[in-house]
Image (cartoon, rainbow, N blue to C red):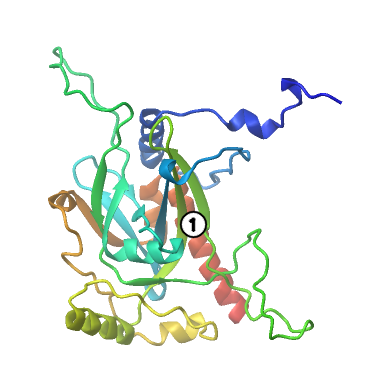
């Protein structure tokens, strides 16, 4: 039996090129649109696409929650006036989850969608010649030490395999640190950007002090945090902080003067969702907090 173009799966219809300009204009509009109580972004149709290593950039972003006060770290563009979550490209050889944790603390070299430019009243001068679909990368600073937070997420990954456990042994945990959203964005007509969104928590004060001491001793600001202990409940985690404790925001974690345009705030969850508008980032925060509440209920 021969196949024709009409026999192609419906997913192929989604494989259409979107220029970086259209993508950033759409993202800028979504980030400023007023959210509605019922609005939830939907997953797109599956796509078929292939990219070799020279045409693919992998990034990671993170929503960092302070569980005790129900707040989350959100960044603000002080010139263009929009809100976003910290994100950026992972280092070569770095795990995406580890990259997300690092980007939540360090400078973030990432594509940020500017607002659509206003129409000029007079003819514009001839712009300098640049490559087609050239994207601008900026440094974004949030400065909060963090670690990925295992949550009861719906996902399609197989259960962890433990060869030493008997076949009848139950799974060691119902909580995982899988990406809660994944986004695809064009970098150029031939290059692709893939962004994984994770959920994390700020660190308890004793661990914060330990890593800061290590940073001072080694002369390296960023220190990889230990993983969240699988037997530590959220209620026990909250008791590790004294009443009124505020997570430490580290200054000077960026390396570029452009970082002066970006500010980071710990905002109440609902306020953060409102500022992020009708965007995937708003749903990252929403789903992340729902996962935290679900884990707390399961532990209770």
Q: Residue 219, image x and y in percent?
A: 17, 76
Side of 293 where 171 appears, left or right: right
Residue at position x 49%, y 83% in the image: 229
Side of 137 where 182 appears, left or right: right
Residue position marked by numbered label 1 in the rendering = 286
- Relative to the observer, which residue lies in front, 198 or 278? 198
- Relative to the observer, which residue lies in front, 289 or 192? 192
Q: Is residue 112 above or below residue 90?
A: above
Q: Quadrant of the C terminus?
A: bottom right
Using a 10 Å C-alpha cutoff, classify the residue at mark 1 as few (fewer than 14 neighbours), some (14 to 19) or many (20 or more). some
Q: Residue 102, image x and y in percent?
A: 33, 65
- Relative to the observer, which residue lies in front, 139 or 275? 139
- Residue 242 visible at all: no
Q: Residue 131, image x and y in percent?
A: 28, 28
Residue lying at the far top in this picture: please name it.
123
Q: Is residue 161 above or below residue 18?
A: below
Residue at position x 61%, y 38% in the image: 47
Q: Quadrant of the N terminus?
A: top right
Quarter-of-image position of residue 90:
bottom left
Number of labels in the image equals 1
Residue at position x 78%, y 81% in the image: 167
- Residue 222 visible at all: yes
Quarter-of-image position of residue 151:
bottom right
Residue at position x 64%, y 31% in the image: 12
Side of 90 where 80 appears, left or right: left
Q: Is residue 7 above or below residue 28?
A: above
Could you say whether the residue bearing mark 1 is in a helix, strand or loop? Answer: helix
Q: Residue 93, image x and y in percent?
A: 41, 62
Q: Is residue 33 above or below residue 176?
A: above
């Amino acid at each position: 039996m021969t196949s024709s173009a009409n026999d192609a799966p419906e997913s192929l219809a989604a494989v259409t090129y979107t220029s970086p300009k259209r993508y950033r204009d759409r993202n800028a509009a979504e980030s400023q649109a007023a959210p509605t109580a019922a609005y939830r972004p939907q997953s797109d149709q599956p796509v078929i696409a292939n990219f070799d290593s020279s045409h693919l950039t992998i990034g990671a972003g993170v929503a960092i929650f302070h569980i005790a006060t129900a707040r989350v770290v959100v960044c603000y563009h002080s010139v263009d006036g929009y809100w976003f979550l910290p994100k950026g490209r992972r280092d070569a050889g770095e795990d995406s989850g580890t990259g997300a944790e690092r980007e939540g603390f360090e400078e973030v070299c990432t594509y940020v969608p500017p607002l659509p430019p206003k129409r000029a009243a007079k003819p514009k001068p001839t712009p300098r010649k640049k490559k087609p679909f050239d994207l601008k990368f900026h440094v974004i600073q949030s400065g909060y030490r963090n670690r990925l937070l295992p949550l009861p997420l719906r996902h399609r990954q197989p259960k962890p395999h433990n060869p030493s456990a008997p076949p009848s042994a139950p799974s060691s945990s119902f909580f995982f640190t899988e990406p809660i959203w994944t986004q695809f964005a064009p970098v150029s007509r031939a290059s692709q950007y893939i962004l994984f969104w994770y959920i994390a928590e700020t660190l308890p004060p004793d661990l914060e002090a330990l890593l800061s001491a290590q940073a001072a001793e080694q002369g390296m600001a960023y220190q990889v945090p230990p993983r969240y202990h699988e037997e530590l409940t959220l209620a026990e985690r909250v008791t590790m902080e004294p009443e009124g404790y505020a997570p430490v925001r580290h200054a000077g974690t960026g390396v570029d003067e452009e970082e002066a345009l970006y500010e980071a705030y710990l905002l109440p969850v609902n306020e953060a969702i409102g500022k992020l508008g009708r965007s995937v980032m708003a749903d990252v925060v929403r789903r992340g907090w729902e996962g935290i509440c679900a884990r707390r209920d399961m532990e209770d």
